[in-house]
Amino acid sequence: MHPFEFRRWIKSVFKPLALSTLFCLGIAHAQTGPVKLMVGFPPGGGTDAIARILADKLKESLGVPVLVENKAGAGGQLAAQALKAAAADGNTLFLSHDHTISILPLVIKNPGFDSAQDFVAVAGFATFVNALAVSGGTPARNVAEYVAWVKQQGAGKGAVGVPAPASVPQFLVGVIGQKYQLDLQAAPYRGSAPMMADMLGNQINAGVGSVPDFIENHKAGKIRVVAVLGGARQAALPDVPTFAELGLSGFEDVPYYGIFAPKGTPQPVLDKLTTAVAKAVAMPDVHSRLTAMGLTVGFMSASQLAQREKAYSQTWARIIQNTGFSAH
């Protein structure tokens, strides 16, 4: 065969194969629905509500159903383990705040996942602050009145609900108790929803949790948020002072909300997901609804979210170490 004809023959054989290979790679990177958006807490809490707002908009951009799945338990640990085990195809995502991603690896020796090794950031969309709230059965209208009430009713002893054990709210209970010379004991719940149920039923007199967990019942007058963490007052609670204003500083590094995927998810899929989150967060109705829930809305790219998570983990590693807490 003439060399020129041989070259033509080679091209005729391998060109279709090359196209076929590229087509297969494209299929591998294509997203096939539905997308499962996992939440590590029960229905009815702040994180669940946030996930449902975003899921409704993400399906418009992705063109496939986005279904919220509540995989509650162990402060989001079960959901994180499920994300690690999921196929890295972009069809299983995890919407989480700081507790599961940043804090659990600091307080549990073997949580069953490694955030840095097993997950990849998709996008962040908001920050928030934690707060101290009192139940409707408590006469206190501010921190000073709450402190006085605890000293009067319980000789300085009191229980404060927190949405998960070994969480930032639990550590904050200790810090608040130390600040005001109270013997406050954290009462861990399996999520903010059951904690809120007990606060509404006056089964527990106070709770520390995120503003999104408290905001609806605060506005309804069923509970009262008396102070917030962070460096500034919250737009949704302009009349509520920060703890820094009250003399308790050092907690200005605020938590975050983000979406994560299994490590190994193809970059084209991640890019598509990141773009979809950016579009959702930019929608005026999404922005206003999340802001009304007590979030400070702001899109973070995958790299920005990863950097934010790393810095937050380092901050709380120091704080937790200073409390003398030992990982179990």
Image: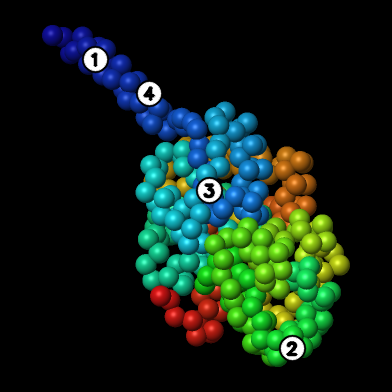
- Label 2 – label 1 distance at C-alpha: 86 Å
Give amino acid for label 1.
Val
Mark with earlier residue (1, 3) = 1
Q: Give the label, 3 or 2, closer to the camera.
A: 2
Judging by the rendered image, the residue that carries numbered circle 3 is 70
Give amino acid for label 4.
Phe
Instruction: Indicate whether 140 appears above or below 75.
Output: below
Q: Pointers 1 and 4 in contact (CB under 8 A)?
A: no
Is 14 on the left-hand or right-hand side of 75?
left
The residue shown at (61%, 60%) is: 194
The residue shown at (71%, 68%) is: 202
Give amino acid for label 3.
Asn
- Label 1 – label 4 distance at C-alpha: 16 Å
- Label 4 – label 2 distance at C-alpha: 71 Å
Q: Which of the 4 quarters of the picture holds residue 232?
A: bottom right
Q: Quadrant of the N terminus?
A: top left
Q: Secondary structure at mark 1?
A: helix
The 10 Å Cα crowd at callout 1, few under 14, some 14 to 19, many 20 or more, is: few
Judging by the rendered image, the residue that carries numbered circle 2 is 151
Q: Position of residue 168 (x, y in %)?
A: 58, 71
Q: Secondary structure at mark 4?
A: helix
Q: Pointers 4 and 3 in contact (CB under 8 A)?
A: no
Mark with earlier residue (3, 2) = 3
- Label 1 – label 3 distance at C-alpha: 51 Å
**Front in this rendered view, residue 213 or 299:** 213
Q: Which mark is residue 23?
A: 4
Q: Which of the 4 quarters of the picture holds residue 176?
A: bottom right
Give amino acid for label 2.
Lys
Judging by the rendered image, the residue that carries numbered circle 1 is 13
Mark with earlier residue (4, 2) = 4
